[in-house]
Image: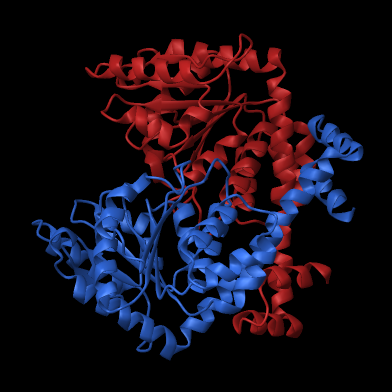
Chain colours: A blue, B red
Amino acid sequence: MKLVHDMLAGHRLSLARLISKVENRDSDLSLIMGQIYPYTGKAEVWGITGPPGAGKSSLVDRLAVHLRAEGKKVAIIAVDPSSPFSGGAILGDRIRMQQHFGDPGVFIRSLGTRGKHGGLSRATNEVVLLLDAAGFDVILVETAGVGQTELEILRLAQTVIVVLVPESGDSIQVMKAGLMEIADVFAVNKCDRPEADQLVRELVTMIGMSAHDEKSWIVPIQKTQALHDLGIENLRRAIGDHQQYLTQSGHREMRAREFLKNDVIHILSERLNQTVLQAFETSSGQELLDQLFKRKMDPYRAADIISAV
Amino acid sequence: MKLVHDMLAGHRLSLARLISKVENRDSDLSLIMGQIYPYTGKAEVWGITGPPGAGKSSLVDRLAVHLRAEGKKVAIIAVDPSSPFSGGAILGDRIRMQQHFGDPGVFIRSLGTRGKHGGLSRATNEVVLLLDAAGFDVILVETAGVGQTELEILRLAQTVIVVLVPESGDSIQVMKAGLMEIADVFAVNKCDRPEADQLVRELVTMIGMSAHDEKSWIVPIQKTQALHDLGIENLRRAIGDHQQYLTQSGHREMRAREFLKNDVIHILSERLNQTVLQAFETSSGQELLDQLFKRKMDPYRAADIISAV
């Protein structure tokens, strides 16, 4: 496939076209993924999440600048499950583009849902695989918020950075949103605010409470001021430490295997979805639906019948 | 099954126990659902959503009081996908309980995720079916926020009420969050605030812009002040009008059929999930996972192999 060949050779427009195919759930997807898959597995994938207004985008931009200074190629995927838009100007894409304008070592793309439910985490994963195969060294996946869909998407990240700002009740928010479980590194952004130390203390307490033995990763907390480029160096180092920990502890392989299992399940689910919808279009499917609607059959029995066909 | 029999006879503790079985994905679920399903399909199911702080809970409580005055039995399910808690005291459950204390015609229950991803919308649907079979006339499903998971859950509602408060940028929020597409009725709560009329005007414009012919439902906007019990009567009437519209237009049946198809898909997905995870536990499954991890095989091909077994 010429498009894949060109993308692997570093052709930017081909990469953009392949990403669009992923978004549109193109019928060639399994072919494309089969071809690029051998070239994947090299990139570091970082997830960045946190409540709206925490300054995630600024932090991601600063991290990108630092990574560029290390000579690394960086891709940023901004995922917004509440937005029907994609590839466009959400999350300040245009402003961000300006900063890295003309730098072929930075790729920025937004992903939204386009009205489809559930498919966003699969699409995000496939875009990550494309960017990985295209030779980006670090792929930053930034979510717009901290909902269930966002947490689901962040499963693909090796290192998850949770960005918080000093505000009353924020540490309770962290617990409620399930962020404590997924954080590998905490960034306390806008740390010039007076309540910053209080938030850090609360996080230290919460990290201390979670069960761990001497071999487990102690989630570090880094104070940052993305707008003034303060603390980014330390944050980057903490992420690097976590990446090293993943390799040395064997957790990298464990996480990858766990993720691959889920990926296969998601592919099969997508197929199942199509197959069942088609089955309901047949005359016997319509009859089944009639019986369901009239309460003469329950959904579990209908599922048995459909899966037996 | 005695538990089901008792629940159908109006025994409250049996109902609560069955709901717990749903939450814990009990192995008897398909049996239970098969037994109760013939008794379902009678209740009106209303969905209530909107951004945090819009006053959804107060509005739901006021609606419940009005419905009780009509002699209707009311169940309230408060769903919070960001909360790991359920059945407990989230969303002010205890305060709410006090208001309806000792009234067997009101049932209130909170549902959270308990750390499982994706299963919340299935569980909510099954709880609705249980309450329907238990004889509740109106089931109000209230979501904590407006994320993708919440919208997915609201598919089960016949009438969706979107609650907003006058605040700058709120109508943009509505569009971004996909609320325009799912709203059957708008409630502008806290309508004593000065910007209320501005919000109403913006909503009128947005409703006017969405394509419709003379037969389609024009989404009404009702101003309310839940805390002072103002406008609730009109809101309840608007919901009633929509319920009537659903029946007369044939949309009730269309929506129900569409929902049933998805329900069957969800049941099969849940089974698929278990089957594939088990397949990966076998020695040939472990070998397949090895090949995936080493990039010798891609996930699409692995999916082919697993589904052929």
Q: Residue at x 36, y 36 (%)?
A: B95
As rendered, which of B51 and B106 lies closer to the eye? B51
Q: In this figure, what is the number of numbered marks?
A: 0
Q: Is residue B116 left or right of residue A78?
A: right
Q: Is residue B174 visible?
A: yes
Q: Position of residue B73 (x, y in %)?
A: 58, 24
Q: Residue at x 40, y 16 (%)?
A: B205
Q: Residue at x 19, y 52 (%)?
A: A167
Q: Quadrant of the N terminus of chain A?
A: bottom right
Which image quadrant is residue A205 in?
Answer: bottom left
Q: Is residue A233 left or right of residue A240?
A: left
As rendered, which of A146 and B270 lies closer to the eye? A146
Q: Is residue B84 visible?
A: no
Q: Position of residue B258 (x, y in %)?
A: 71, 34
Q: Residue at x 53, y 63 (%)?
A: A125
Q: Position of residue A261 (x, y in %)?
A: 63, 72
Looking at the picture, does residue A70 appear above or below residue B166? below
Which image quadrant is residue A72 in?
Answer: bottom left
As rendered, which of A281 and B24 lies closer to the eye? A281
Looking at the picture, does residue A60 appear above or below residue A221? above
Q: Is residue B221 left or right of residue A304?
A: left
Q: Position of residue A189 (x, y in %)?
A: 20, 61
